[in-house]
């Protein structure tokens, strides 16, 4: 399935408005200007900075906010690719601390913020969005687990043994491959993050992995193999996401040159570009009614009447699913805000059509958990049950009730 790329390199993402040079100077602020320059010359280009605990802690906080706001609601898992084995171990501790801190922020929210709807959420800063989502999923978030999986060496710290032992690694991988959420709790597992340096970047298939956070240089075939970890279908995924903290984007073009254009067309794109695609999918859904002479989808009854044709209902559902699935990927980013009003209205039209025409296809999991919540909250607030079961034609009483409802 498509892979969406999101650039969150040090500039502006790791620390409020700070670029990597400022972070470097902050980490070594006790050094003189001459010493600082010497350190940069000796270590910065070799990645020494990327093992620095404070930088990893900042990135871990950003990763956790991103995961909770965009990935966790759909019950998907994550893989972090660290600069080194040491960085992987440090990420392990930093991510746990970041999760705990985020839960503290969530519990400290005001009652108004805890009850915030999704439309209002899109207008708030990313930190607030993450805290609100953390509150909504607080029990699930509190229970998620993290694990580094790294290769071993004779000189390793003895404390690393649990992360380098092959049998223990196999057990961790088996846990990670299970869904995060399942109706049968015995089939779910809370291990939500695997942290690696080079392991599991090839030949590792876990459809439940929805996002990869890249924090080391990767090029050519290894880069393509790595990002392909998130494009396995399953678990209601509509795309895989790669979040880049190192800046490998410039190598993606080179890596893709070895493939024919038709093999990779649409396989990898920037998340920013998806807003234009979202606009197109929105237009296609709305145009279903404009083509039938309806000027505005505010006239819901007219829209529902247009859907009295079975083929038209099926076409509308397909177009609505495509629009809603991409909106789920974009939310709760502010770019999704202009589409929420029409998303609610189109979902309401679809729900009324399902209540009137028993064979109207369901939206199901294709639209994603964030959009399902948006739809259900809105439709239920209007007094409509979005999950009315189909009526059995063999049930005479059901038919009579149904006809009575339509007449009313």
Image (tube, rainbow, N blue to C red):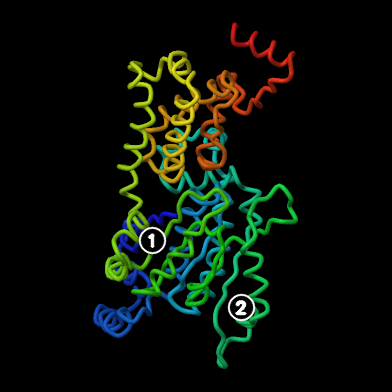
Disc number placed over residue 163 in the picture, else none = 2
In the image shown, does 386 or 52 lie closer to the viewer?
386
Report the residue that reaches farthest toward the bottom. 154
Does residue 209 appear to the left or right of 139 in the view shown? left
Question: x, y percentage for residue 283?
Answer: 33, 31
User: At 57% from the left edge and 75% from the top edge, which residue is drawn?
Assistant: 149
Q: Quadrant of residue 400?
A: top right
Q: Position of residue 219 (x, y in %)?
A: 34, 74
**Does residue 83 appear anywhere in the picture?**
yes
| Quadrant including the C terminus | top right
Considering the numbered disc 2 on the image, is that residue within a helix, a strand or a loop?
helix
Looking at the rendered image, the quarter that the N terminus falls into is bottom left
Q: Position of residue 346 (x, y in %)?
A: 45, 26
Q: Which residue is mark 1?
A: 14
Q: CA distance from mark 2 to mark 1?
A: 27 Å
The quarter of the displayed image where residue 164 is located = bottom right
Residue 181 is left or right of residue 80, and the answer is: right
Which residue, as the protein is rendered here, is positioned at the far top? 407
Q: Is residue 71 above or below residue 212?
A: above
**Quick one: SS at disc 1?**
loop
Residue located at (34% from left, 54% from top)? 266
Q: Residue at x 27, y 70 (%)?
A: 254
Q: Position of residue 79 (x, y in %)?
A: 51, 65
Left or right of residue 186: residue 231: left
Camera-side residue of 376 and 334: 376
Badge nearest the viewer, 2 or 1: 2
Front-most of residues 364 and 307: 307
Q: Residues within 10 Å of mark 2 (few under 14, many from 20)?
A: some
Work out whether 91 lies above or below 298.
below
**Which is nearer the eye, 149 or 314?**
314
């Amino acid at each position: 399935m498509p892979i969406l790329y999101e650039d969150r390199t040090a500039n502006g993402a790791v620390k409020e408005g700070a670029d990597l040079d400022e972070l470097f100077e902050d980490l070594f602020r006790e050094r003189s200007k001459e010493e600082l320059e010497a350190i940069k010359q000796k270590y910065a280009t070799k990645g020494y900075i990327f093992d620095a605990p404070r930088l990893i802690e900042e990135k871990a906080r950003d990763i956790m906010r991103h995961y909770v706001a965009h990935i966790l609601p759909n019950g998907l898992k994550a893989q972090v690719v660290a600069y080194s084995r040491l960085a992987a171990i440090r990420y392990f501790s930093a991510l746990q601390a970041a999760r705990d801190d985020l839960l503290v922020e969530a519990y400290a929210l005001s009652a108004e913020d805890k009850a915030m709807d999704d439309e209002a959420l899109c207008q708030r800063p990313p930190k607030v969005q993450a805290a609100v989502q953390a509150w909504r999923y607080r029990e699930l978030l509190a229970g998620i687990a993290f694990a580094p999986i790294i290769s071993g060496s004779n000189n390793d710290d003895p404390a690393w043994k649990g992360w380098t032992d092959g049998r223990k690694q196999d057990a961790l991988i088996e846990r990670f491959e299970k869904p995060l959420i399942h109706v049968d709790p015995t089939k779910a597992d809370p291990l939500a993050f695997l942290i690696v340096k080079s392991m599991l970047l090839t030949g590792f298939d876990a459809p439940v992995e929805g996002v990869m956070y890249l924090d080391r240089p990767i090029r050519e075939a290894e880069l393509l193999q790595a990002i392909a970890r998130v494009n396995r279908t399953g678990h209601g995924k509509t795309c895989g996401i790669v979040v880049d903290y190192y800046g490998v984007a410039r190598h993606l073009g080179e890596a893709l040159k070895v493939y024919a254009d038709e093999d990779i067309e649409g396989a990898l794109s920037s998340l920013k570009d998806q807003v234009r695609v979202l606009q197109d999918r929105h237009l296609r859904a709305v145009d279903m009614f404009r083509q039938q002479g309806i000027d505005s989808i505010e006239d819901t009854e007219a829209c529902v009447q247009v859907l009295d044709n079975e083929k038209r209902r099926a076409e509308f559902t397909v177009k609505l699913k495509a629009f809603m699935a991409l909106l789920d990927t974009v939310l709760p980013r502010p770019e999704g805000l202009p589409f929420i009003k029409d998303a609610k209205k189109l979902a309401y039209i679809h729900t009324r059509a399902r209540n009137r025409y028993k064979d109207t296809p369901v939206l199901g999991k294709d639209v994603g958990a964030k959009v399902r919540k948006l739809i259900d909250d809105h439709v239920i607030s209007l007094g409509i049950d979005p999950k009315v079961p189909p009526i059995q034609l063999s049930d005479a009483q059901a038919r009579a009730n149904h006809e009575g409802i339509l007449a009313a």
